[in-house]
Amino acid sequence: MFDGITPQLLFGQLLIGVINGSFYAMLAMGLAIIFGLMHVVNFAHGAQYMLGAFVAWLLLSTLGVPYWGALFIAPLVVAIFGLVMERLILKPIAHLDPLYSLLVTYAATLVIEGAVRLNYGSTGLPYSSPLPGGVNLGFMFMPWYRLWVVVFSIFTCLGTWLLIEHTKLGAYLRAANESPETVESFGINVPRMMTLTYAFGVGLAGLSGVLAAPIYQVSPSMGSTLMITIFAVVVIGGMGSIMGAILTGYLLGIVEGLTKVFYPEGANLVIFFIMLLALIFRPRGLFSGEKS
Amino acid sequence: MRIALVLLGVAIALALPFFVYPILLMTILCFVIFASSFNLLLGYVGLLCFGQAMFLGLSAYIAGYLLKTTGVSIEIAILAAALVSALLGGFVGFVAVRRTGIQFAMITFAFAQFVYFMLLQSEFTGGEDGMQGIPRSDLFGVVDISDSRTFYYFVLAMTALAIFAIYRVIHSPFGEILKAIRDNEARVESLGFRPERFKIIAMMISAGIAGFAGALKATVFQFATLTDVSWTVSGEVILMTLLGGMGTFTGPMVGAAAIIFLNDELAQFGEWALIAQGVILILVILFLRRGVVGEAGALWRRMRNRNKG
């Protein structure tokens, strides 16, 4: 039954799977950090990812700032946006059920996407690749830019994981989640730390958006369509487990790519089926470091 | 006092189609049912179903398909569609109650998107184009109700029926257990009940009623589209419920009417409708968490107590 499958098709889809997986991993990681450290479900993560791509596009088209500049500036801009969002709409409801944080960030998504669509329309805007060309590996063609995305995302994920799990700063963050009073008594400003955590997670989303701009088209809805998958990734990996989110992200990207080769009709649904199976057989999450 | 208010409401509902465009009124009624079905879960069991649109949309297609291809009478099509929707609700509930709170919301969100893709790829739905030309077949196979104003009275009667059903559920012993689960699940479990079972049954009832609304909506507009299954509609019903007041019986109805009116007013401004919804939802969450009806009720009680004391 696998007759028509050439190595080009197989490895081509596998590469697309790894690329998609890189974005799943980075976004799911940001979501897991924000949830794990401050118990906020950041629905706006997709919209903030889209903002990252948009800021990069604006920087290029209006100010002529190239991709490599945008890679630093756009995440910062998006992080500052996150900072303002946290102060305005998340902080006032921090003491309430996390459901409210989901709803208020959902509402923010409507406003952000609507505002972008209002100003720039809903069609995709092209962003040309900063690294044209590629290398022929014999069995497939590997574009340089895609290789860059895979390598960069792996380093970003590992670096973030190390920062939170293996540094003093990360220890403070995790402790502040368990017992804010104790950490505060050490002289640490916990509310400010929470705000910065949110800004950091949002900045990661913005960074992913810049990375995505040359691969996918820059459009207002590019984030919300991705959010569905990201939610499934986080549910499968177990909420709040950072490594779980990263691994599940890459894994599901690859599984999705392979499904496109062997059973194209199922590619849209395979992640959902995995979520169903995971919920039924591993109801606590694949990599459960969870506390629910 | 209460009876007088209800009678006044009935009189207004009967007279309205002579003053307001019937389709708009019927849309409001469908969403009154839909929002109330959502509130049954959020307000009375404490479950946030972030994919309520899957029941509305699936049921609209099923009712439409039955009416187009089989020639059954309209009430059979609506009930059959609601039943299928209830079964879907039972399945979603079976899987989703394994997680609580925030994860329940995320799972139902993913589920709804799954239903969206399934409907997009199915042949019978007409994919992106939607399903058109759904007939308003005769009531009980004999009474012609296809005229818009007559049809309004049919929809009004169906709405009354659905709202009465929800009222009975909430005020039954079963409903009391649901509220107890909302307030303290561990306690209910310690009394020998199984909260999961009650949640799944509540999901089925809520999904069935949401499906009822969807099937009605399909006969009102005489078409069904993917919009009914989309996450914006799932979000819209949350907004309606919160704006009106979750956990209040009339709140979601008020919220539904307000949002449908708003959408109708803003329809010509395109994106502004969604932006307005987002802004209202943010404001409600920050400043008006009990909703309009909830706040009004609290104010009313405060004033009464002051007069007494």
Image: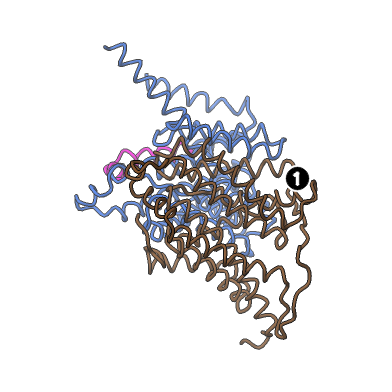
Residue A8, image x, y percentages = 70, 82
Amino acid carrying mark 1 in the image: Tyr
Residue B36, image x, y percentages = 45, 40
Dividing the image into 4 quarters, which one contains the C terminus of chain B?
Answer: top left
Residue B123, image x, y percentages = 64, 65
Query: Is the residue marked by circle 1 packed among few (<14), some (14-19), or many (20+) residues within 10 Å?
Result: some
In magenta segment, residue B169: yes
**Relative vertical location of residue A20 with respect to residue A185 in this rendering, above or below:** below
Residue topped by disc 1: A120
Name the main secondary structure of what is drawn in magenta.
helix
In magenta, the rendered stretch is B159-178
Do we see residue B22 in this rendering? yes
Figure label count = 1
Chain letter, colour brown in render = A
**Image colouring:** by chain
Chain label for disc 1: A
Q: Is residue B21 left or right of residue A64?
A: left
For image coordinates 47% across by 29% down, the residue present is: B287
The shade of chain B is blue
Do we see residue B211 in this rendering? no
**Relative vertical location of residue B5 with respect to residue B182 in this rendering, above or below:** above
Closest to the observer: B286 or B48?
Answer: B286
Residue B239, image x, y percentages = 52, 38
Closest to the observer: B77 or A260?
Answer: A260
Question: Picture quarter containing residue A124?
Answer: bottom right
Query: Callout 1: helix, strand or loop?
Result: helix
